[in-house]
Image (tube, rainbow, N blue to C red):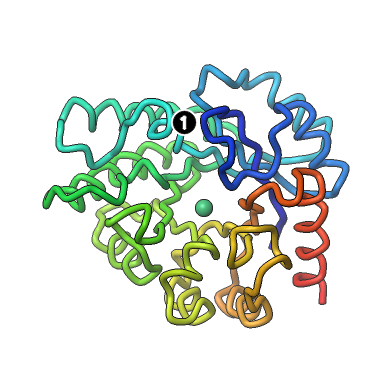
């Protein structure tokens, strides 16, 4: 398993669960100093990132890009993939495609989280709209040999999939096999009966992990039981990233250091 950390470039998301906020150059350099393998970036749009400049920063720090979030489509523009309005749905899909096109050449995936639609969504067609969007994005990502990543969220953030089992059922219903699950330990702590068992249910579909504690603070600052979780990930032969998506508590730099200490403790013991 490899380590990664989140960087947010979205001012509107201040207060959200992203660790580093110092801009790309400083954040990437700092993550490299701490020994992370990769970064996951939450960007307002593709226009906010110059791919050549990003590539140089990553090379200099010895890092990879593991994923790009799409949530700014919702946070900034109120776009969602299950919008009842067909025009809005198309705009949401186009936004996701643009993120896939930026991430793909880096060998990185786009993540569908809050773009799936919020908690208040009541349209009966919402699940089928989401499925159509995952078909579209999964097929689009395939040209880069990367999967699209879909994240079940807790009940306060979506009425789509809240558990890993729901996510597996959704992915297995698609005609594309190029979508994988993001298992976020914070959401799972709210929704799952047993987090380790749920990861085993996820099995081959588990494509990314948000590595965070029960209270959304960095790993080690809550009451999550990581021993069984790490064992479950080893049992399903998970080879992907444990990516710190947590509140920058007590501050971004200490949160990054704390997660790296915890990552080493749990993966090298
Ligand atoms: Mn997450």
Instruction: Locate the C terminus and report the quarter of the image it occupies.
Output: bottom right
Instruction: Locate the N terminus and report the quarter of the image it occupies.
Output: bottom right
Q: Which residue is mark 1?
A: 99
Task: Give the answer, above or below, for where 209 lies relative to 149.
Answer: below
Spot occupied by residue 238 in the image (x, y as percentages of width and height): 59, 68
Q: Judge the density around disc 1: few (<14), some (14-19), many (≥20) Cα neighbours within 10 Å.
A: many
On screen, residue 22 versus residue 223, left or right, reads: right
Spot occupied by residue 65 in the image (x, y as percentages of width and height): 65, 39
Task: Give the answer, above or below, for where 44 lies relative to 242.
Answer: above
Cβ of disc 1 within 8 Å of ligand 1? no
Front one among 144 and 90? 90
Front one among 121 and 227? 121
The residue that appears at 41% across and 57% down in the rendered structure is 153
- The image quarter containing residue 87 is top left
The residue that appears at 20% across and 53% down in the rendered structure is 127
Front one among 255 and 4? 255
Front one among 223 and 47? 223
Task: Give the answer, above or below, for where 30 lies relative to 221.
Answer: above
Task: Give the answer, above or below, for where 119 lies relative to 84.
Answer: below
Numbered-mark total: 1
The residue that appears at 47% across and 62% down in the rendered structure is 187
Q: Secondary structure at mark 1?
A: helix
On screen, residue 124 versus residue 178, left or right, reads: left
The residue that appears at 51% across and 43% down in the rendered structure is 109
Spot occupied by residue 255 in the image (x, y as percentages of width and height): 76, 51
Spot occupied by residue 18 in the image (x, y as percentages of width and height): 62, 44
């Amino acid at each position: 398993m490899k380590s990664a950390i989140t960087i947010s470039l979205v001012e509107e998301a201040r207060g959200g669960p992203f660790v580093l906020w110092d801009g790309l150059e400083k954040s990437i350099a700092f993550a490299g100093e701490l020994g992370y393998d990769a970064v996951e970036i939450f960007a307002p749009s593709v226009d906010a990132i110059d791919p050549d400049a990003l590539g140089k920063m990553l090379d200099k720090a010895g890092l990879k890009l593991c994923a790009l979030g799409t949530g700014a489509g919702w946070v900034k523009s109120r776009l969602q993939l299950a919008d009842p309005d067909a025009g809005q749905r198309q705009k949401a899909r186009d936004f996701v495609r643009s993120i896939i096109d930026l991430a793909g050449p880096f060998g990185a995936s786009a993540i569908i989280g809050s773009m799936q639609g919020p908690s208040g969504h009541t349209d009966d067609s919402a699940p089928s709209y989401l499925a159509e969007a995952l078909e579209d994005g999964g097929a689009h990502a395939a040209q880069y040999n990367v999967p699209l990543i879909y994240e079940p969220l807790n009940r306060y953030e979506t009425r789509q999939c809240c558990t890993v089992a729901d996510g597996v059922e959704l992915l297995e219903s698609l005609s594309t096999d190029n979508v994988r699950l993001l298992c976020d330990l914070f959401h799972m702590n709210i929704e799952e009966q047993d987090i380790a068992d749920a990861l085993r249910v996820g099995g081959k579909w588990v494509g990314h992990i948000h590595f965070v504690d029960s209270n959304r603070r960095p790993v080690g600052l809550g009451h999550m039981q990581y021993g069984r979780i790490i064992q479950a990930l080893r049992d399903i032969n998970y080879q992907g990233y444990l990516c710190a998506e947590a509140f920058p508590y007590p501050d971004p730099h200490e949160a990054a250091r704390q997660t790296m200490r915890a990552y080493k403790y749990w993966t090298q013991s």
